[in-house]
Image (cartoon, rainbow, N blue to C red):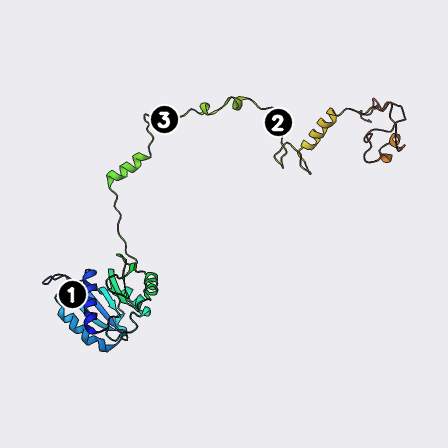
Amino acid sequence: MDDHHIKVDLLKLLVDNHLTVAQGTTNRKDVLFVVSKSSAVKELEEFASCYADRVNMKIGIVENMDLVTDGPLYNAILSGFGTDDNISCDLILLPTYTTLLTAGGTLIAKTKIGTEDKLVKHMKLCGFLNVAISESVPGVVVGNMPTYKVGSSDKVTLNPETKENVVSAWKLDDNNSETISEDDLLEADDLIKPDSSSLRVCATTKKAKACKDCSCGLAEELEANRLKDTPKPDTSNAKSSCGSCYLGDAFRCATCPYLGMPAFKPGEKVQLAGNLLQDDF
């Protein structure tokens, strides 16, 4: 691109980003042009002298390390607009630009057409906001620094009237608030007292079924209820298929209906002695 087209693009970018002021105005913006070769300095100096009354422009070369300063100096930086700049904005310098720009400052960087998305990504990673590809000049990406600096602080003041409104919003006014009686939420079934037996549950399973290693007494209680409801077998007409049912548990099979009963003679009614439950002493 020739020198004339570069100057036209520079002026267009300066105007579009509000970096120029009317002639005779004192509050002119400070702009830094960064070029990669010293051969482009002369052409940019001519451009800067033509618009010196509208913007304060300074030219810097990438090779000069004195660009790094301790504080922000420029309202905008334009990089890669030299006549012999074939590569455009150097990505390594992006962190340096963040230190040179003031809060809210603008970076206008030129890159190869078709690689704008890569430059947009790197500028966002360096902290630039509102990064977008220029619509007026091809191959140009524009981004802004945040309007604050790292470590800056400001005092927050609360409006007393607003504070009172916030406090009053959390107060309950008995005259305006509707209350619901807890009794109205209960149904007829909720008022029936449950049977105590239905509330008996195992301490481990929390259910009305004893666990395998029940130690809370529920297993014994359920077994006693089962035996109470189970009719006792009649041994008056008992006939043994194996011939050992009368002899006692030691001779009975696992499915014998007489398990747990004392030995008896065929046809004899099994009865417990009256003194069986009495103490021996």
Quarter the C terminus occupies: top right
Q: Say what secondary structure mark 1 lies in.
A: loop
Foreground label between 1 and 2? 1
Question: Where is residue 57 shown, x and y percent of the image?
Answer: 18, 68
Among the two numbered marks 3 and 2 on one chain, the one whose residue lies closer to the N terminus: 3
Query: Which residue was labeled with disc 1?
Result: 55
CA distance separating discs 1 and 2: 91 Å
Looking at the image, is mark 1 or mark 2 earlier in the sequence?
1
Contact between labelled residues 2 and 1, with CB atoms less than 8 Å apart: no
Q: Quadrant of residue 60?
A: bottom left
At 16% across and 73% down in the image, what residue appears? 46
Q: Mark 3 points at which residue?
A: 178
Q: Residue at x 30, y 36 (%)?
A: 167
How crowded pointer 3 is (Cα within 10 Å; few <14, some 14-19, many 20+) is rated as few
In front of the other: 163 or 5: 5
Q: Position of residue 181 (x, y in %)?
A: 42, 24
Percent across and percent down for residue 237 are: 87, 23
Residue 83 as seen in the image, left or right of residue 114: left
| Distance CA(mark 1)–CA(mark 3) | 67 Å
Q: Name the residue under label 2.
A: 198
